[in-house]
Amino acid sequence: MGRTVAAWAVHLYTALGVPLGTWAVYAAFAGDFRTAWLLLAVTVFIDATDGALARLVRVREVIPWVDGGMLDNIVDYFCWVVVPAIVLERAGLLPLWAMPAPLLASGYGFAQVQAKTADNYFVGFPSYWSLIGFYLYVLDAPLWFSTALLLFLSVMVFVPIRYPYPTKLKAFRTVTLAFSAVYGVCMLVLIFNLPDPPKWVAWVSLSFALYYGLLTIWLWWRRRADGSQSA
């Protein structure tokens, strides 16, 4: 009985992203972007931790008739794609005519059978719209830049480059985790200092994005060079 309750609690924990994301939408329409980004930050935390909790209590064994992966995808599409697109449009960082680009591109991305490979790679640009949108907001990006970037990344969803899952990557694991730790601290500083976070902290944290991009390119080049399908 205890394992069943724990398993259902994990599913509920995952599903909480939807009401939190909905409240973020209401906050954005009210012009309260600090609350909107804080709520989105909570959904990111839930997404980063629910998988470990599911494995800990063996949700798939206890409640085999509920597809936790499907639930996770529904919540992820809403919280990582739909909500940030609305927040960005309300914040004046994405024109209404460009909103369908990430929505449609990520819809395709989530629907792919091989959206995520067995060796923990994303195929095509992952739906990191919450994180990208947060940076555009914090750095006061001009409309033309944010629009061009989001349209470009929407196209990259369809390009079958494999993007590593940072915390599960075997190659350069120590370096990747170190960058991730610095990134996590910087993000906490930025979030808790909204609406006027120190921009230099945002620039420091972008070192992780640069590292991640270069690592993705290097792994792609190495696979092409030696024919390997794992890293």
Image (tube, helix red, strand yellow):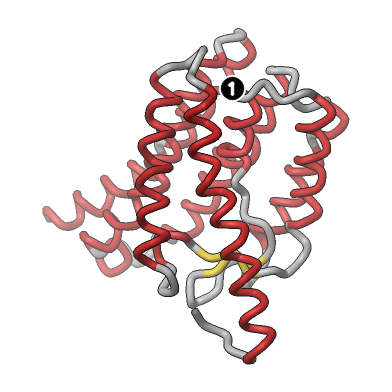
Residue drawn at point x = 35 percent, y = 64 percent: 174
Left or right side of 122 for 171: left
**98 to the left or right of 55:** right
Judging depth in this view, the residue of 33 and 69 nearest the camera is: 33
Residue annotated with mark 1:
25
Q: Residues within 10 Å of mark 1 (few under 14, many from 20)?
A: many
Name the outermost residue toward the left: 2
- The residue located at (64%, 91%) in the rendering is 227
Q: Secondary structure at mark 1?
A: helix
Please name the residue shown 42% across and 17% down the image: 193
Q: Count of labels shown?
A: 1
Left or right side of 24 for 152: right
Quadrant in which the N terminus appears:
bottom left
Kindly indicate the quadrant of the structure image that contains residue 157.
bottom right
Closer to the camera in the image, 220 or 8: 220
Q: Quadrant of residue 130?
A: top right
Residue 112, horizontal then vertical, whole percent: 67, 66
Q: Quadrant of residue 192?
A: top left
